[in-house]
Image (cartoon, rainbow, N blue to C red):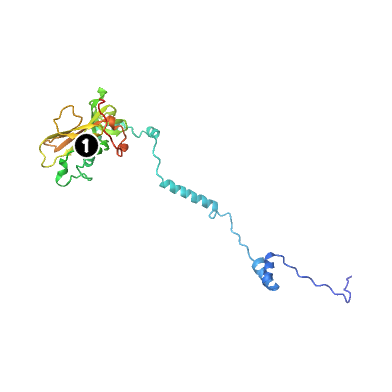
């Protein structure tokens, strides 16, 4: 059994639902209600929301930052200079130790020849490429304390053939060999008997020579004595005797057209490393300790 509405009584109409959204409220201020509802439905309510996946390793920001950091670290390590070895590491690795098969005098004779050419260049007898100057005029030059004293004091002695001529320890006198290592306080020599000897610089006087080729017009024999007080040198011509501290001998032989410049070196005034001597200013000192 159904009930029908009473005649004369009207049914209330359905009220439209209102949209409570901030965007719709703002749209109603600028547009009519129908236009605001249409724009809200198309642009806001039915707008698709696209979500990007976050599980992809290629676009992971954390992995990207780590990759960039490692690349920067690798670049700096490649450009950075290696750290030099400490004294303990050098002793452990045996950097300065000579193996038994390397202790041969014939091996270091070529090093001595290279050193002789180096000294000729230092003293100004030859050019950088090992050739003599035009005309050979420089081969007749005289070595003086003012002109060559500082050059000789700062020269490198690796490869020099040195001999101990005076020392407080008489057992060191006569020791002769090629310098294979020049430390602050010692010379390490390889002798003609294929032996390695360490000679202290203190209280020792060393003698070494530089062979200079003779020019075509030089035939006479001359001797010049140069006295050495410490690192400085004074040159004067006088008869050569056994008491001279430095001699420059100019000799000529039939088969070997060279003359030998002989120098004496006081070890007490030479207790410096080769790298330190290159930029050090030497002073005159007393040499009456022997």
Q: Is residue 224 left or right of residue 13?
A: left
Residue 110, can we see it? no
Instruction: Count all numbered tags in the image, as a single digit.
Output: 1
Question: Where residue 274 appears, x then y in whole percent?
Answer: 30, 36
| Quadrant of the image containing the C terminus | top left
Q: Residue furthest top?
A: 170
Quadrant housing residue 236: top left
Considering only vertical position in the picture, is 268 above or below 114? above
Quadrant housing residue 95: top left
* Label 1 residue SS: helix
Q: Is residue 234 left or right of residue 18?
A: left
The residue sitting at 20% across, 34% down in the picture is: 234
Residue 69, can we see it? yes
Question: Where residue 278 appears, x then y in whole percent?
Answer: 29, 39
Q: Residue furthest bottom?
A: 8
The one of 3 and 110 positioned closer to us in this rendering? 110
The one of 112 and 151 positioned closer to us in this rendering? 151
| Quadrant of the image containing the N terminus | bottom right
């Amino acid at each position: 059994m159904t009930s029908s509405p009473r005649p004369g009584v009207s049914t209330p109409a359905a009220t439209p639902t209102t949209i409570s959204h901030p965007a719709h409220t703002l749209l109603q201020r600028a547009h009519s209600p129908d236009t605001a509802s249409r724009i809200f439905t198309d642009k806001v309510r039915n707008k698709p929301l696209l979500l990007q996946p976050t599980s992809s390793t290629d676009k992971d920001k954390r992995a990207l930052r780590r990759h960039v950091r490692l690349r920067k670290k690798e670049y700096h390590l490649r450009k950075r200079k290696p750290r030099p070895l400490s004294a303990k590491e050098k002793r452990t690795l045996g950097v300065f130790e000579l193996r038994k098969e390397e202790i041969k005098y014939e091996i270091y004779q070529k090093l001595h020849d290279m050193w002789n050419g180096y000294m000729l260049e230092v003293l100004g007898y030859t050019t950088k490429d090992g050739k003599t100057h035009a005309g050979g005029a420089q081969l007749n030059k005289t070595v003086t304390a003012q002109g060559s004293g500082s050059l000789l004091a700062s020269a490198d002695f690796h490869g020099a053939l040195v001999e101990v001529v005076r020392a407080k320890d008489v057992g060191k006198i006569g020791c002769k060999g090629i310098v294979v290592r020049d430390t602050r306080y010692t010379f390490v020599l390889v002798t003609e008997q294929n032996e390695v000897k360490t000679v202290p610089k203190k209280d020792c006087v060393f003698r070494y020579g530089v062979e200079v080729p003779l020019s075509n017009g030089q035939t006479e024999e001359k001797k010049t004595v140069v006295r050495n007080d410490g690192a400085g040198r004074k040159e004067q011509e006088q008869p050569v005797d056994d008491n001279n501290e430095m001699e420059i001998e100019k000799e000529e032989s039939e088969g070997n057209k060279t003359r030998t410049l002989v120098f004496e070196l006081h070890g007490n005034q030479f207790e410096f490393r080769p790298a330190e001597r290159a930029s050090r200013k030497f002073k005159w000192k007393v040499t009456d300790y022997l």
